[in-house]
Image: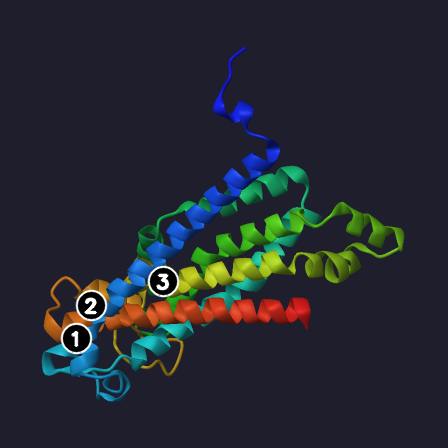
Amino acid sequence: MIWSRSTFLSPSNRDRLLVWTLRGAAGIAGLILLFIVAFLILEALPALRTLGLIRFVTDPSWHPGEEFYLMLPMMWGTLFATLGAVVLATPLGLLSALFCRWYAPKPIARTYRRFIELLGGIPSVVYGFWGLVVLVPMISRLHPPGPSLLAGIVILTIMILPTIALLADASLAKVPQEYIRGAAALGLGRWAIIRGVVIPAAKSGLFTGVILGTGRAIGETMAVLMVCGNVVQTPQSLFDPIRTLTANIALEMAYALGDHRSALFVSGLVLVGMILTLVSSAEWISRGRIYG
């Protein structure tokens, strides 16, 4: 008989080992996050000391060569593009999951899931290239110039749709069958079961999918850089070109020096703040739904 260390570990000891391993992994992930935030703060401090926070929202424009550092239009561009993509992708993702789980025949559902998974694996630069070659000319024919907030919303919608759809499908699959059979025994129809039983039981996973999709939309760089026009302005319509915070960092970091470089790290802090606000809001809403 071959003896190993695990042979001498009781089930309770194995559980403790697993718990401490998971705690260690969570602690490492937390430390990495803290190191990233600390690095951003240290790099942003020179601009915060010399310029202050108020100039990032009151300067006349973004022209670092002239010492103008207006960041507000890029913040609005980021928020509008993200919000538009989430508003479009959320119902599409949920309907896709419901179609696969409740309405489509198994061969069609299996093929459709593979298609959604393929969409999720395509690099963002490929989406951006497709948008630049196909989508932007289509929008230009509808309303010049073509590179615009609308192009960014459409590209981001396609990019975050797989995240929302696949997590929604997984959440729907985890709804206990006892719930469904009980509702069917009461005489409820398919849609009544979905609306009254399945979606409420899966709402935590559905909400998580939306949050993850929103986080990806906020942080996306290459695709929006290629299709949005990169004009620093607050959009007045869907057809106006915009520049997002991520695109601004990617465009200017290679040659930025001094306060200009530090101001780009302030942009990174703003993005982190957006993500933290999103996660905190999601946690608050989730707790309100659970305990309220």
Q: Position of residue 206 (x, y in %)?
A: 59, 58
Residue 208 numbered mark, or none: none
The secondary element bearing badge 2 is classed as helix
Q: Is residue 43 visible?
A: yes
Residue matched to label 3? 219
| Residue shown at 89% from the left, 55% from the top | 186
User: Could you tell which of marks 3 and 2 lies nearer the N-terminus?
Assistant: 2
Front in this rendered view, residue 285 or 106:
285
| Distance from Cα at disc 2 to Cα at disc 1 | 7 Å
3 vs 2, front mark: 2
| Displayed quadrant of residue 66 | bottom left
Q: Is residue 50 above or below residue 249?
A: below
Front in this rendered view, residue 226 or 67:
67
Circles 2 and 1 in contact, beta carbons < 8 Å: yes
| Distance from Cα at disc 3 to Cα at disc 2 | 19 Å
1 vs 3, front mark: 1
The secondary element bearing badge 3 is classed as helix
Residue matched to label 1? 46
Q: Position of residue 144 (x, y in %)?
A: 32, 74
Q: What amino acid is found at the position of numbered circle 3 in the picture?
A: Gly
Pick the quarter of the image with the N terminus.
Answer: top right
| Left or right: where 25 falls relative to 251 | right
Residue 43 numbered mark, or none: 2
Mark 1 crowd level (few <14, some 14–19, many ≥20, 10 Å Cα):
some
Q: What amino acid is found at the position of numbered circle 1 in the picture?
A: Pro
| Residue shown at 41% from the left, 63% from the top | 217
| Residue shown at 70% from the left, 57% from the top | 201
Q: What amino acid is found at the position of numbered circle 2 in the picture?
A: Glu
